[in-house]
Image (cartoon, coloured by chain):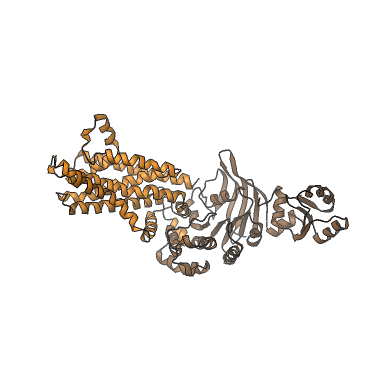
Chain colours: A brown, B orange
Amino acid sequence: MTEMLIQARGLTKTYGDFVAVDGIDFDVAKGESFGFLGPNGAGKSTTMRIIGATSVRTSGTLTILGKDPEVNGPQIRAHLGVVPQQDNLDNELTVSENIFIYGRYFGLSSSFINKKIPELLEFAQLEEKKDTKVEALSGGMKRRLTIARSLVSEPDILMLDEPTTGLDPQARHILWDRLFRLKEQGVTLLITTHYMDEAEQLCDRLIVMDRGKIMAEDSPAQLIKTYSTKEVLEVRFGSDRNQEMVEVLRPLADRIEVLPDRILLYATDGEQLLEQITAKGIHPNTSLVRRSSLEDVFLRLTGRSLVE
Amino acid sequence: MTSNAVALSERRLGKFGDKYFAGRPQQVLLRNWLSFKSSAWIAVVSGFLEPVLYLLSFGYGIGELVGNISTPGGDISYAAYIAPGLLATSAMNGAMLDSTWNVFFKLNESRLYKAMLATSLGPLDVALGEIAWALMRGGLYATAFTIIIAGLGLVTSWWAILAIPAAIIVAFGFASFGMAITSFMKSHHQMNFFEIFLLPMFLFSGAFYPLTVFPGWAQAIIKALPLRQAIELVTRAMNGEFGINILVNFTYFLVMICVGLFFTTKRLNALFMK
């Protein structure tokens, strides 16, 4: 049987009248890469903070490595590597000093940390920057350093809150590659993201969250299979005509979604559907056939886009 | 499976305040030292200069007009008269510099405490570490000031050496209280409260003249202020006056230290463990 590192039942967090996390249940297995997918304000970061023992749940139960964060906050934090959404590196220190002092916060010995620093700098591809003040680093470097820093305590679970938000495409890919390596080493990853490609790339299993609730839970492939068709045909008629075309197109597709700038037609075979449409004398300004993604799953589940 | 960090975090488990204190405030001090090493020393010197400049300009400038002052211990120069008060002020300044603006920055802008509290450190570690750092600066200023007044021949007895521990107690009190108040401040605007409060306290706490120039009710108010208590504590320690009075001054600071620590810890917990 797989060992469950995290178990949440009826996990709830309210701020006054506002319900940030609304009675969610989930399990995370050892070595798993587990994602929280949802738009901003879905309750992902709040859930992460509760797991990170820096926020107290309102109700429900939560066990992390057999411990309750309400009772064993510091002990749970000792198990975790935390990469927050906003970098909180120590700008007044150098790259290696950042790793060093972070290890000291955990009480680790200087000799232990000093042995780890070269290894972590290599992982973060920051060897040449080791004596540079953090302020001078690029966004991607800062994020990699934040990850390297969180690994100094050899955490059982690495928590990444929106790890690539604000990074350029190249920096994102470097970061994904680094996270893959950790996954291969058997580190349990918890990732929140509102990027579907990130969730597809990194997560073995994920929960789709919206307004504090879990809308679905499965592997990315299975979620797409369950909640969407194999392919999607995207057509544009110009913003004026999109609406009037909807009724004409509706009977042709398995399902139809109307976005402000385009219409999404769900079908097993997108090309075939496009042929059908053109055979009827309908000619969209542009058309595109693509595979279904988690974006489509989210749209189906909530009626809204992930990134708005 | 159990990593090193976990074993370390379990050491204080079951002991008093284990959720708030990991027993590692020295790591917060170490962090400040790493940051300080490479920072501008000029900031340290400038904070120290203020009371020294007061001593030179008032002590020797106005001192020329005032002449000698008669005290129970005999006649002393005006510069010697104001030296203990300025020493207490120096300790206060040093402690307040770190525990107010610097703490405000770390709380609100650099998110440093947030990073610290995501580790197995607790809020009391952060509070104690920061306060200890601030009081070290206060202690450093006070020690340097003592050396200067000794060099200027303004101390008459060996008791003056006690000015240093007295000033450290003063710095501890101000650092602790300063950080507690800072932790409740929400904007730069509100931080100006400290200036509004500190300057009049400095001018009216009787560092430059005896409190007897004020009516009784005003004296009572001033005597309740921390800087007046600090001046009395330092002066009495320097004069070797050990009686009930210095005990009252000492207790005043002990209360200030404890209340400050309590509220700082509570507030950090509320801010970062909500």
User: Would residue A187 be found to the left or right of residue B77 on screen?
Assistant: right
Depth check: A66 or B34 in front? B34
Q: How many marks?
A: 0
Q: Residue furthest left?
A: B74
Residue A53 x, y percent position in the rendering? 51, 50
Residue B122 x, y percent position in the rendering? 43, 51
Residue A228 x, y percent position in the rendering? 75, 55
Q: Residue furthest right?
A: A280
Residue at image point 61% right, 60% down? A33
Depth check: B217 or A189 in front? B217
User: Would residue A45 be found to the left or right of residue B16 on screen?
Assistant: right
Depth check: B61 or B220 in front? B61
Residue at image point 29% right, 33% down? B221
Residue A56 in view here: yes
User: Would residue B192 be found to the left or right of residue A71 on screen?
Assistant: left
Residue A51 x, y percent position in the rendering? 55, 51
Depth check: B7 or A208 in front? A208
Residue B169 in view here: no
**Quarter of the image holding residue A279?**
bottom right
Residue B265, compared with residue A228, is above or below; it is above
User: Would residue B226 be found to the left or right of residue B156 on screen?
Assistant: right
